[in-house]
Structure formats: C-alpha cells, structure tokens
Image: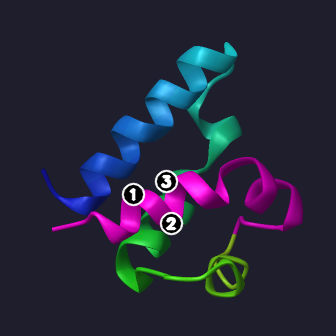
C-alpha cells in the first residue's frame, strides 16, 4: 500500500481505539502533507500543518516509526 494509504489505515485504527471520528486524529490535508514531506524527526513533524505539540506528543513516535518503515 502507498504511504498515504498506510497513514489512513493507521488513523482509522487510532480513531476506532479512541472512539472519535478520524478527522479528530488528523485531517486528510495533514496526512497528505506527511506523505509528501516524509518528515524524519519530531522537529520536521512540527512543520506539518495540523501537527502541534499536543499531536506530536500523542502520535509523533508512532508516525515516525510508520514513516521509517515506509517503502
């Protein structure tokens, strides 16, 4: 699957586990930007629209793991 599809699958799993709509985790715009930029550090993730300190704390490590295992 493409990186964007993997990000969307990850977001769906997060939203299901937390009982919230997917957009509460991240909007599509944010996932598209992550897929395009492929940030490799926490600092780079903070440059993505829609990711601030709270989202970084909540999801940053998992996102970076997902990005480093991207094909």
User: x, y percentage for residue 10?
Assistant: 42, 39
- Secondary element under disc 2, as helix, strand or loop, is helix
Q: Is residue 8 left or right of residue 70?
A: right
Name the residue that disc number 1 marks: 66
Name the residue that disc number 2 marks: 64
- The dot on residue 14 is none
Cβ–Cβ under 8 Å for marks 2 and 3: no
Cβ–Cβ under 8 Å for marks 1 and 2: yes
Kindly report the distance in space between the C-alpha atoms of the residues bearing marks 1 and 2: 5 Å
Name the residue that disc number 3 marks: 28
User: x, y percentage for residue 48?
Assistant: 63, 78
- Secondary element under disc 3, as helix, strand or loop, is helix
Residue 32 image-quadrant placement: bottom left
Q: Which residues are magenta?
A: 50-71
Residue sitting at x 57%, y 32%: 22
Residue sitting at x 26%, y 49%: 5
Residue 21 image-quadrant placement: top right
- Few, some or many C-alpha atoms within 10 Å of disc 3 (few <14, some 14-19, many ≥20)? some
Of the 4 image quadrants, the one containing the C terminus is: bottom left
Is tag 1's residue or tag 3's residue first in the polypeptide sequence?
3
Q: Nearer the viewer, residue 30 or 41?
A: 41
Q: Nearer the viewer, residue 61 or 48?
A: 61
Rendered position, 32 above or below 39: above
């Amino acid at each position: 699957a493409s990186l964007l599809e993997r990000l969307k699958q990850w977001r769906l799993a997060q939203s299901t586990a937390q009982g919230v709509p997917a957009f509460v985790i991240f909007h599509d715009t944010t996932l598209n930007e992550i897929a395009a930029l492929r940030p490799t550090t926490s600092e780079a993730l903070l440059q993505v629209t829609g990711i601030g300190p709270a989202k970084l704390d909540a999801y940053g490590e998992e996102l970076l793991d997902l990005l480093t295992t991207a094909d």
